[in-house]
Image (tube, rainbow, N blue to C red):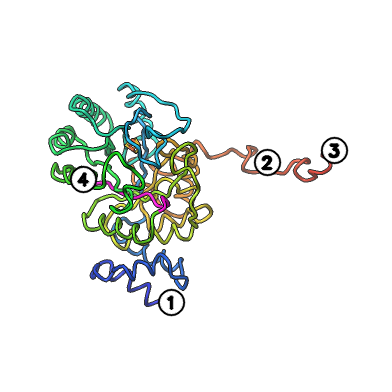
Amino acid sequence: METKFYQQLTEKALSHPACFDEELCRKILQDKEIDVLSLVHAAYQLRKQFFGREVMVHVINNVQNGFCPEDCHYCAQAKTSKANIEEYPLKPDHEILAEAKRAYESGAYRYCMVFAGRGPSEKRVEKLAQLIQKIKQEFPIEICISAGLLDAPKAKILKEAGLDRLNHNLNTSEDHYPNICTTHTYQDRMNTLAAAKQAGLQLCSGVIVGMGESVGDLLDVAFSLAKMNVESIPVNFLVPIEGSALQNESEMTPEFCLRVLCLFRFLSPRAEIRVAAGRELRLRELEVLALYPANSLFLEGYLNTRGAKTSATLRMIQDAGFSVKSNCDLSELLKPEVKKPGQQGTRSNLKSLDELRPYLFTPQ
Ligand code: SF4
């Protein structure tokens, strides 16, 4: 593929988005002639134009775990899941506030609270509104919640309480949706997004790649999100959880994951593209390259699964020459991690005898 092809991707994304038809998008995802580094560079030109070299860091808080009547097949909290999770009802306010403080002090730009369940009752919406007000009074942090299905009056109450953004992922295409959930529909999800938009909330809606969908399904959902102009698109790569319906590993190379992130950047050049769950598992050694198409990530893991250590993620951002969008300075955030000479990881990082001569100590 010639250099011009990649340059044109950047130009077309800005001035002729209709050029990204199914044929071109399939090429981006599947063509062996594509040079992925050139593709990443082309996507980076867009990321740089709209977000510079800043990374938006999000911390997700699982404020209630389990007890969900829905059956989303990818989820450890689904009623059908046999995953060995620690279930608990809604955390008390003081715990949620303490976690918001910690997120803020770790450099998080946005604090995301996730509630299991089909959708909140009116009483629960009032409770959420109070919680949002309390957090906003104490910390200058953006708030996003993921609370299941919502109608317009409930979305309005949350907006008036100070909620910035609502997360509600489409996850996959309309056609594939019945294969990943039977207790609610794709249309239910679209209705919630419409209600949130009507209330003036920013929309966060993304995908989970690797749930047995075809490339066509992936393109369908990418086109739908682009058409809705959602402000934020979390791109998750399935983390199979033992006991959940989608517990079996699906094949996805790190190179393919990068292509997916680039595709979302080309289709939604101004959106906050988040490399979300599965970042560590799926991108492996190529993880840092995700910062070029994506401008956002999660710290401290995901809903029910662990991620990289906070310090490792922040260091990756710093090592690649990016900064965090935060009131805190990245080098300040990393200060407690700076090791003194003599500590493991700096000068004394010398191999011991059993590492140098492992067979010396092995009984024959
Ligand atoms: S994704 Fe949400 S609605 Fe679906 S099973 Fe999990 S907690 Fe319930």
* Residue 360 counted in the magenta span: no
Q: Dot 4: what SS?
A: helix
Please tell me which of labels 2 and 1 falls first in the chain. 1
Q: Which of 281 and 69 is in front in this view?
A: 69
Q: Dot 3: what SS?
A: loop
In the image: residue 345, left or right of residue 361: left
Q: Residue 193 carries which label?
A: 4
Badge 3 amino acid = Pro
Q: In which quarter of the image is residue 224?
A: bottom left
Q: Is residue 139 above or below residue 261?
A: above
Please tell me which of labels 3 and 1 falls first in the chain. 1
Q: Residue 1 carries which label?
A: 1
Counting from the top left corner in percent of width and height, residue 80 is at: 40, 34
Q: Which mark is residue 177?
A: none
- Near mark 4 (Cα within 10 A), the count class, few <14, some 14-19 or many ≥20, is many
Asked if marks 2 and 4 touch (Cβ < 8 Å), the reply is no
Q: Nearer the viewer, mark 4 or mark 3?
A: 4
Q: Which mark is residue 363?
A: 3
Please tell me which of labels 2 and 4 falls first in the chain. 4
Please tell me which of labels 4 and 3 falls first in the chain. 4
Counting from the top left corner in percent of width and height, residue 236 is at: 39, 48
The residue that label 2 is drawn on is 348
Task: Work out how far the residue at label 2 is from the one at label 1, CA to CA, in angstroms.
Answer: 48 Å
- Near mark 2 (Cα within 10 A), the count class, few <14, some 14-19 or many ≥20, is few
Task: Work out how far the residue at label 3 is from the one at label 2, CA to CA, in angstroms.
Answer: 29 Å
Badge 2 amino acid = Ser
* Residue 204 counted in the magenta span: yes
Task: Work out how far the residue at label 3 is from the one at label 1, CA to CA, in angstroms.
Answer: 56 Å
